[in-house]
Image (spheres, helix red, strand yellow):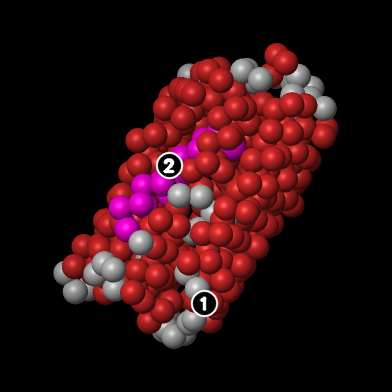
C-alpha cells in the first residue's frame, strides 16, 4: 500500500475516534456542571484526565520502542474509547470522572504507537503534509461529533442519548483499523533513515511545549463560562466547539505545508495565537483562535518530533512529547480553573505570561538547531 493511502486510512480511523470523544468533550463542561461540580473541580477532573493520558504516553512510547508492537498498543488504546458511550449510564460525577479518565488513558496508550506509525509514512510525502492530512481528517470527526450532540440536545433527547449514539463510530473505527493492519502489518518499511541533533535542542523543545500548553485555555473551561454566563444557549455550545474543530480541519494541511517550507520557525505562531483564546470569554466567535492553535499543536508539534528523533527512539520521543504536553495541560487547566474562580479577567494575564516563556524557549530552540534543519 502506498504511504498516502495508508495515511488516509489512519486519518479515517482518527475521524471516527474524534467523532466519539470530541463529541462528548464538547459538552463535558456543561454535563459535569449538571452533576454539581465547581470550576475548580472541573479543572482538576479534566486536567488530571489529560495528565493521566499524556503521562502514560511516556511509558507506552518506551514500551513500543522496545517491543515494536505498534499495532497492539494502537488497537488497545482505540478500544478504550468505548468508555464514552458508557457516560450515558452515569448519574454520579465521580463515575463520570473515572470514565473520562479511562478514555484519556486509552489515548495515552495508542498515541505514541499511532504517531510513530504515521511518522514512518509521512517521511515519503512530507512530514507537515502527512500529519496535516491526518489532522484534517481527524478534525472533520471532531466537527461532526459535536453536531451529533447538538441534535440530541436540540431534539430534547439529552446528553445521555448523545453519548449512547457515539458507540456507532467507535465500532466502525475498530473495523477500519483492522483493515489497515492487514494492509500494512510492518509500517517501519516506510522509513529507515535516522538523523542526529544535539540533545539540548529536544529539551528546549519540550520546555517550549510545556509553557505553550500551560497557557492554553481548554474548551471545557470556556464552555463552563458559557454555561454560567449564558452568553450562548446550552444547545449551541457544541456548535461552537464544532466551529473550532472545523477551523482546525481547514487550516491543518496549510499549516503542515508551511512547516515543510519554513520548518521549526512555525512554532512561533503558537504563543502568538494562544494569548488570543481568552477573547472567547467576551465574544464566542473568538473560539476560532482555539481551532487555529489546535491545528498547529496537532500538525507541527508531531512533525517536529519526527524530525528531531531517530527511528529507533521515535516512540519514546513521542512519549516524552505527550508526557510534557499532558503535564502542561494539567498544570494549565488546574491553574486556569483556580484563577477563573477568582476572576475570569485574570486568565488572560496568566496566559500572556505562560506564552512569553514559551516564546523564549522557541527562540532558544531555533538558535541551537543545525543550519540545515531550520527549513527541513
> Element at badge 1?
helix
Left or right: 294 with respect to 209? left
Residue 297 magenta: yes
In the picture, residue 300 is in which quadrant? top right
State which tag comes first along the sequence, 1 or 2.
2
Residue 314 visible: no
- The residue wearing badge 1 is 341
Q: Position of residue 127 (x, y in %)?
A: 56, 24
| Disc 2 crowd, CA 10 A, few/some/many (<14, 14-19, 20+) | many
Residue at (63%, 46%) from the top-left corner? 356
Q: Residues within 10 Å of mark 1 (few under 14, many from 20)?
A: few
Residue in the picture at 65% in, 63% down: 331
Task: Return the residue found at the far right.
Answer: 199
Q: Residue at x 46, y 40 (%)?
A: 295
Residue 159 versus residue 196 in the image, above or below: below
First to last magenta residue range: 283-301
Q: Give the residue at mark 2.
A: 292
Residue 195 has which mark?
Answer: none
Amino acid at each position: 500500500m502506498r504511504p498516502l493511502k495508508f495515511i488516509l486510512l489512519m486519518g479515517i480511523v482518527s475521524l471516527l475516534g474524534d467523532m466519539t470523544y470530541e463529541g462528548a468533550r464538547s459538552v463535558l463542561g456543561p454535563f459535569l456542571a449538571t452533576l454539581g461540580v465547581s470550576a475548580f473541580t472541573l479543572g482538576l477532573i479534566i486536567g488530571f484526565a489529560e495528565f493521566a493520558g499524556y503521562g502514560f504516553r511516556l511509558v507506552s512510547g518506551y514500551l513500543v520502542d522496545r517491543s515494536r508492537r505498534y499495532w497492539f498498543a494502537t488497537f488497545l488504546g482505540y478500544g478504550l474509547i468505548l468508555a464514552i458511550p458508557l457516560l450515558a449510564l452515569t448519574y454520579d460525577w465521580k463515575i463520570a470522572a473515572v470514565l473520562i479518565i479511562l478514555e484519556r488513558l486509552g489515548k495515552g496508550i495508542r498515541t505514541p504507537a499511532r504517531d510513530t506509525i504515521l511518522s514512518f509514512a509521512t517521511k515519503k510525502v512530507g512530514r507537515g503534509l502527512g500529519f496535516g492530512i491526518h489532522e484534517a481528517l481527524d478534525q472533520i470527526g471532531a466537527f461532526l461529533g459535536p453536531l451529533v450532540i447538538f441534535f440530541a440536545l436540540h431534539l430534547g433527547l439529552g446528553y445521555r442519548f448523545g453519548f449512547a449514539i457515539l458507540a456507532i463510530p467507535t465500532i466502525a473505527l475498530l473495523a477500519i483499523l483492522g483493515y489497515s493492519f492487514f494492509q500494512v502489518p510492518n509500517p517501519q518499511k516506510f522509513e529507515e533513515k535516522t538523523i542526529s541533533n544535539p540533545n539540548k535542542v529536544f529539551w528546549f523543545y519540550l520546555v517550549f511545549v510545556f509553557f505553550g500548553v500551560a497557557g492554553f485555555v481548554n474548551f471545557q473551561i470556556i464552555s463552563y463560562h458559557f454555561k454560567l454566563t449564558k452568553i450562548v444557549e446550552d444547545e449551541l455550545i457544541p456548535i461552537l466547539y464544532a466551529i473550532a474543530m472545523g477551523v482546525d480541519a481547514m487550516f491543518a494541511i496549510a499549516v503542515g505545508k508551511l512547516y515543510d517550507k519554513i520548518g521549526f520557525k512555525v512554532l512561533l505562531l503558537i504563543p502568538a495565537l494562544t494569548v488570543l483564546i481568552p477573547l472567547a470569554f467576551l465574544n464566542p466567535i473568538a473560539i476560532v483562535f482555539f481551532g487555529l492553535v489546535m491545528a498547529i499543536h496537532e500538525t507541527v508539534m508531531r512533525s517536529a518530533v519526527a524530525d528531531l528523533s531517530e527511528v529507533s527512539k521515535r516512540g519514546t520521543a513521542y512519549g516524552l512529547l505527550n508526557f510534557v504536553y499532558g503535564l502542561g495541560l494539567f498544570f494549565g487547566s488546574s491553574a486556569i480553573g483556580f484563577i477563573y474562580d477568582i476572576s475570569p479577567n485574570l486568565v488572560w494575564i496568566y496566559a500572556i505570561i505562560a506564552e512569553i516563556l514559551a516564546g523564549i524557549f522557541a527562540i532558544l530552540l531555533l538558535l541551537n538547531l543545525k543550519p540545515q534543519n531550520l527549513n527541513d
